[in-house]
Image (cartoon, rainbow, N blue to C red):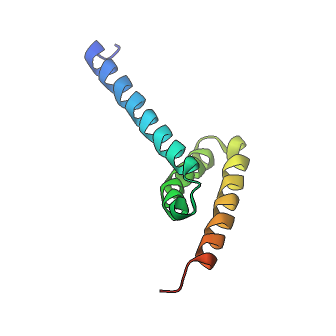
Amino acid sequence: MPPPRESRDSSSERVRSNISCRSGLSDFGGRASDQSLVPLALTILGPIIVNILLFHGLMNPAGNRTGVFVTIFWGVVFVSVVRRSPES
C-alpha cells in the first residue's frame, strides 16, 4: 500500500529544499574566490566533500575517483592557505 499523498508531498518537498540548500552552499563555496573568503569557502566545502566521499564509498564506489580528486585539490588549497596565513 503506497503512503498517503500528504506524506509523499511533504517528503518530496524536504528533498527539494535540501538539494537547493546544498547546491546554494556549493555555489557560494565555489564563487568565494576573493582572497579573504578562501578560508570560509574551504570551511563550507569541507562537509560537502565528506558527504560526497561517504556517498560514493558506501553506495556507489564506481564514482569514487571524482571525490578523491576533489579531496586532493581541497587539501592542496588548504595547505597553501595555512602556509600563507599569519602566525597567531
Task: Report the residue at 26% width, 17% height from top.
Answer: 6
Give the residue displayed 48% in from the left and 55% down from the top: 44
Left or right: 70 in relation to 13: right
Question: In terms of depth relative to the viewer, which is nearer, 53 or 59?
Answer: 53
Give whichever of 8, 84 is nearer the camera: 84
Question: Who's the residue at 56% across and 45% down the image?
Answer: 55
Q: Percent position (x, y) of residue 75? A: 65, 65
Left or right of residue 86, residue 68 in this image: right
Q: Is residue 20 above or below residue 33?
A: above
Q: Which residue of the protein is positioned furthest toward the bottom in this rendering?
A: 88
- x, y (%) of residue 58? 58, 47
- Disc tally is 0
State the image coordinates of residue 70 (x, y, percent, origin top left): 67, 53
Q: Residue visible at 49% across and 55% down?
A: 47
Q: Is residue 17 above or below residue 80?
A: above
Spot occupied by residue 61 in the image (x, y as percentages of width and height): 67, 45
Above or below 20: residue 36: below
Quarter residue 11 falls in: top left
Quick one: quadrant of the N terminus? top left
Along the line of sight, which residue is nearer the eye, 4 or 39? 39
